[in-house]
Image (cartoon, rainbow, N blue to C red):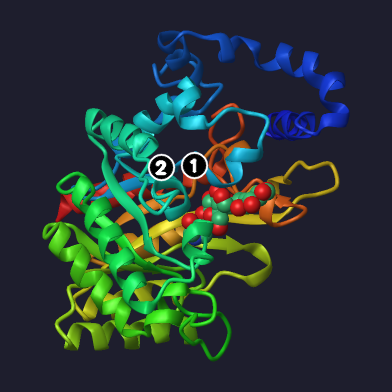
Amino acid sequence: MRRRAQRNAMISRARRPGVYLAVVAMVLTMVAAPAAASPASADAAHGWAGHDHRAGHGKRAPLRRLVPKGFRIGSAVAGGGHHADQDYPPPFPNDRRYRHVLAKEFNSVTPENQLKWEFVHPERHTYDFGPADAIVRSARRDHQAVRGHVLMWHSQNPAWLEEGDFTPRELRRILREHIFTVVGRYRGRIHQWEVANEIFTDGDDPELRTDQNIWLRELGPGIIADAFRWAHQADPNAKLFLNDYAIEGVNPKSTAYYELAQELLADGVPIHGIGVQGHLDFQYGFDHSMQDNLQRFDDLGLATAVTEVDVRFFLPEDGVPTDEQLAQQADWYRWMLEACLNVDGCRSFTVWGFPDRYSWVPHFFEGQGAATIMWDDFTPKPAYHALQATLADARKAHRRH
Ligand code: G3I
């Protein structure tokens, strides 16, 4: 395991310009065989054919084959956002091995950036659906559900919108048109939408992000209900979600959502679920009230989902996670999945990308990384095996009932 981790760290270091040439030959020697493999032989190299246990996949079926009936195990689909500045081309359209693993392991996908405003609506009167269409098409072919991410957010909005100096009336029209256009286009093909993302501030006294979120600032909190209503009109069968980070456990921020959800439901707003993102970090500990938290939303009649899971930590000097770190990370992935599986209406668990080299984490948190379930050569980390075992157990228990 340590050897594989070292190779991972070497690949990451190799992407720094200064050391690129020095290590590229060595890395090529180590990864050349699987990287050059044809799709058929790549199967064997990953162990999916069941004969090669180097990768460890061979011991059990891929994740999507282990889920209890009706459960979705998903991943973000890498592209846009932080990928844009990297020394690799956009992963989804270009990396065949990546697409192969995505199809093999997951029965749900979430475009990581491709449906965000800056991506899909780059100019006032221009939509760019190409990348999202490609994801939705391939998901259909691979029998994967698609989660739509996102309709109303304070981040990754295009300059024309943020700096446009629009009147409230114009902004309302812009949001309504965007929702009808985007949700309408994927009617019947995107089954869940994150309508309002990260609308509360962090801390002990969360408030709506009125300063940062253009919609809340310019149109007031009533726009949340309108966004849900418009999305519902655009696709009456899509399930509509609130979504945020740091709301895994019972805490002031998740309670703010709990109260908002109660208000929206009381007003007859078509809200169907809440997504807890699951971006965890060792330094903040694991909140074991996660299941209770999901359960209280379930008791309101809402679906719950874990939508963007990764577990980050500070890497040692050599960039190689220790076995203890990997074991703790595996526990945390497992605990999150168990919390979800133990709540009736929690039917979907999505990891925020794989492998580590495509993760957003090192770009946001200096010194941290290794947050995903796969090494850079797509072989599984202990966290992957933890998900595998947890799903297998849940499936057995499900069958007994
Ligand atoms: O827009 C700037 C551009 O002006 C600048 O030149 C460039 C320089 O690096 O950065 C651009 O910003 C990038 C941004 O995406 C916009 O495309 C950031 O660097 C880049 O790090 C950012 O990454 C995305 C991030 O959302 C933005 O918040 C990640 O790819 C994406 O994985 C991440 O996903 C979010 C979920 O949507 C919501 N929940 C949290 C999750 C992790 O942050």
Q: Residue furthest bottom?
A: 205
Who's the residue at 11% across and 60% down the image? Answer: 236
Q: Are marks 1 and 2 in contact (CB under 8 Å)?
A: yes
**Viewer-proximal residue among 27 and 170:** 170
Q: Position of residue 337 (x, y in %)?
A: 40, 57
Percent coordinates x, y for residue 64 in the rendering = 31, 38
Residue 187 sits above or below residue 204 on the image:
above
**Quadrant of res 282:** bottom right
Residue assigned mark 1: 384
Point 32% across, 76% down: residue: 169
Amino acid type, mark 2: Gln
- The residue that disc 2 covers is 388
User: Callout 1 environment at 10 Å: few (<14), some (14 to 19), or many (20+)?
Assistant: many
Q: Residue at x 43, y 16 (%)?
A: 43
Residue 44, by quadrant, is top left
The reply to whether residue 370 is visible in this rendering is: yes
